[in-house]
Image: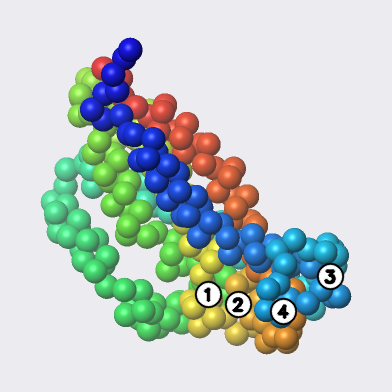
């Protein structure tokens, strides 16, 4: 009879692990499932009872239609999509170029630039929000979607993440490319990018989520209700129908589902990029 190895968990340990995983799963997706259930409940169901039921007794999609009838939710969603697209493109291109330059190029002042990037991470966003607004106003971009997306077009954290990813690429690959006569652009495209696609996918995913869910900065920059992003526009729903949690839950799900779709779509590219980017000896 084979003896269990020293690192093999016992049955009790496995049970504890699965219970902890189940608890974390419940805490993570529990509020989402509750909001989804509330958004599907009919007007005849009491959502204020002491022990409300989880399963809708009169499931309906009418709440989502009422949200669209009350506020221009699809216009707000399109505005959020424009802002998120600008932020994703800016970070995918800008963070990649800056990260490659800091990791692979040698130039005077490289350490100073890296130090400045690190210094910006120490300050919370609320500290620089006034200077950001003054800059956007001086550029004439207040009350525009471009003004909303501009401060997040290139995030310093994403630059440092891409720099770390490029630094993980063995220098021998760069040296071989130089021997073959490759220039900087060719080294980036043919040597660097194939090995950092996993990190680039992480940057894209979290940049989209951050731009889509941002509330404070769009609220400060935008004045025209027709240009509101979805997170700002949904506050009208909350104020008008504060006594009807069904519509509030439906609006929340409309704002939340695109994030789930984007993450579910791109996560496979993340794992594929990590696998394909592994440098084999």
Q: Which of marks 2 and 3 is nearer the N terminus?
A: 3
Kindly indicate whether the residue at mark 2 contacts the one at mark 4 (C-beta within 8 angstroms). Answer: no
Q: Which residue is drawn at the image coordinates 27% and 46% (left, top)?
A: 163
Q: Which residue is drawn at the image coordinates 42% and 50% (left, top)?
A: 20
- Dot 1: what SS? loop
**199 relative to 119, above or below:** above
Kindly indicate whether the residue at mark 1 contacts the one at mark 4 (C-beta within 8 angstroms). Answer: no
Q: Mark 1 points at which residue?
A: 215
Q: Coloring scheme of the render?
A: rainbow
Q: Mark 3 points at which residue?
A: 42
Q: Name the residue under label 2.
A: 232
- 253 or 35: nearer the viewer: 35
Q: Which of marks 4 and 1 is in front?
A: 4
Q: Which of marks 3 and 1 is nearer the N terminus?
A: 3
- Dot 2: what SS? helix
Q: Which residue lies furthest to the top in this view?
A: 1
Q: Which of marks 4 and 2 is nearer the N terminus?
A: 4
**5 relative to 185, above or below:** above
- 96 vs 54, left or right, is left
Kindly indicate whether the residue at mark 1 contacts the one at mark 2 (C-beta within 8 angstroms). Answer: yes
Q: Where is residue 171 in the image (x, y as percent from the top left)?
A: 20, 29
The picture quadrant where one finds residue 194 is top left
State the CA–CA distance, disc 4 to disc 1: 32 Å
For the residue carrying disc 3, how many other residues have a C-alpha within 10 Å: few (<14), some (14-19), or many (20+)? Answer: some
Q: Mark 4 points at which residue?
A: 49
Q: Which of marks 3 and 1 is in front?
A: 3
State the CA–CA distance, disc 4 to disc 2: 30 Å
- Dot 4: what SS? loop
- 243 or 255: nearer the viewer: 243
The picture quadrant where one finds residue 9 is top left
Q: Where is residue 57 in the image (x, y as percent from the top left)?
A: 83, 64
């Amino acid at each position: 009879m084979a003896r269990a190895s020293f690192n093999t968990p016992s049955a009790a340990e496995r049970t504890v692990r699965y219970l902890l995983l189940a608890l974390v799963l419940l805490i993570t997706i529990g509020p989402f499932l509750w909001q989804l259930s509330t958004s599907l409940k009919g007007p005849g169901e009491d959502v204020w009872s002491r022990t409300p039921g989880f399963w809708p007794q009169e499931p309906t999609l009418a709440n989502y239609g009422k949200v669209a009838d009350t506020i221009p939710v699809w216009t707000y969603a399109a505005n959020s999509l424009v802002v998120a697209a600008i932020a994703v493109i800016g970070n995918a291109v800008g963070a990649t170029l800056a990260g490659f330059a800091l990791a692979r190029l040698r130039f005077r002042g490289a350490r100073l630039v890296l130090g400045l990037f690190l210094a910006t991470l120490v300050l919370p966003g609320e500290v620089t929000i006034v200077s950001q607004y003054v800059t956007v106003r001086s550029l004439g971009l207040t009350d525009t979607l471009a003004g909303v997306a501009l401060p997040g077009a290139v995030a310093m954290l994403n630059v440092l993440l891409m720099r770390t990813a490029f630094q993980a690429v063995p220098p021998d690959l760069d040296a071989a490319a130089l021997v073959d006569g490759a220039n900087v652009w060719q080294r980036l495209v043919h040597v660097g990018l194939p090995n950092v696609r996993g990190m680039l996918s992480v940057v894209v995913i979290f940049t989209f989520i951050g731009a889509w869910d941002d509330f404070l900065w769009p609220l400060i920059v935008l004045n025209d209700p027709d240009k509101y992003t979805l997170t700002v526009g949904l506050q009208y729903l909350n104020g008008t129908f504060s006594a009807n949690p069904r519509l509030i839950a439906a609006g929340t799900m409309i704002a939340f589902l695109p994030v789930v779709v984007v993450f579910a779509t791109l996560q496979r590219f993340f794992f594929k990029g990590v696998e394909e980017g592994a440098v084999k000896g």
